[in-house]
Image (cartoon, grey):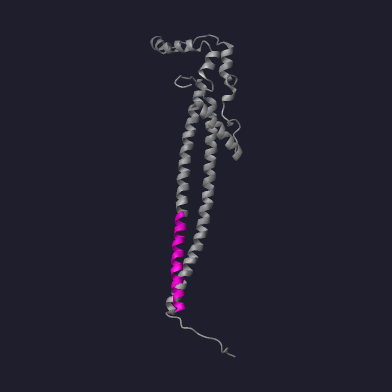
Amino acid sequence: MADANIFFTRVKSPEETRKFLLESSKSVISVLRGYYSIMKLREEKTKTITMLKNHFDELNWLFAKLDELLPQHSIEELERLLPDARAVTQKAKGMKEFIAEHGYKEIDREIPEEIIEAVESPDQINPGARMGREPKGKKDDLSLAELESALSSVEARLKELN
Amino acid sequence: MGETPVFVKIEEYKEILSIMNVINKKLDDVRETLARLKRLKHDEDEQIIAWTANLNDVSKKIEYINELLSE
């Protein structure tokens, strides 16, 4: 039995309304499709960021290694440990010209033991001079606390240099 | 040490040069990865711009339908 309380209203331009509804639906579906594309982009972005982090980890290790290889001691300490070094350096300056004039010849002369020791173990000269980073035994992942401690160590060294 | 020259053992100097070489290559890798990241970020931004445009479009249409229904 038909309900007597049912009312009807007129919808002006129903075709246009339907068209707009379909177009809105199309836009929403296109947004949903974009969701998958954005998720894929983010996945790729995460991978790229991880790759970038690995590059920076490697650079950090390389800088620490470089720092280890560069001289760690002051000239005063060197002069104290190697009193003859300046004289040798002066001689070496003239050596270039000498070699240019007379040619190079290997000489057999023993290097004093303390000089060898001082050159081979610079840590004994200035043990605190090294960076807070550890180049030996490359670490895969540094924690934030370790990074902060390494950063403050580098900043302290920079302050010393300034 | 300031202006005073310092001397490095030849073996270590060679190692330093090879490390510098690796560092330069690594910096190129970093540059390349950053450019890739920039492209990805740009694509993501474009997607969000498209979403905003879609939302504006839908809003206008729904507003129009609303007006039609209220008449």
Is B56 within the magenta?
yes
Task: Report the front residue among A37 and A27.
Answer: A27
Q: Can you see residue A66?
A: no
Residue at (45, 52) in percent of width and height: B42
Task: Report the front residue among A79 and A156.
Answer: A156
- Which residues fall within the magenta stretch? B45-71
Main secondary structure along the magenta-highlighted residues: helix
Residue B12, how many percent across, how many down? 52, 23
Residue B9, how many percent across, how many down? 51, 20
User: In the image, is residue B2 above or below residue A107?
Assistant: below
Residue A82, how many percent across, how many down? 54, 13
Residue at the farthest left position: A101
Is B46 within the magenta?
yes
Residue A62, how many percent across, how many down? 53, 32
| Image mark count | 0
User: In the image, is residue A89 above or below residue B64?
Assistant: above
**Quarter-wise, where is residue A90 in the image?**
top left
Q: Can you see residue A58?
A: yes
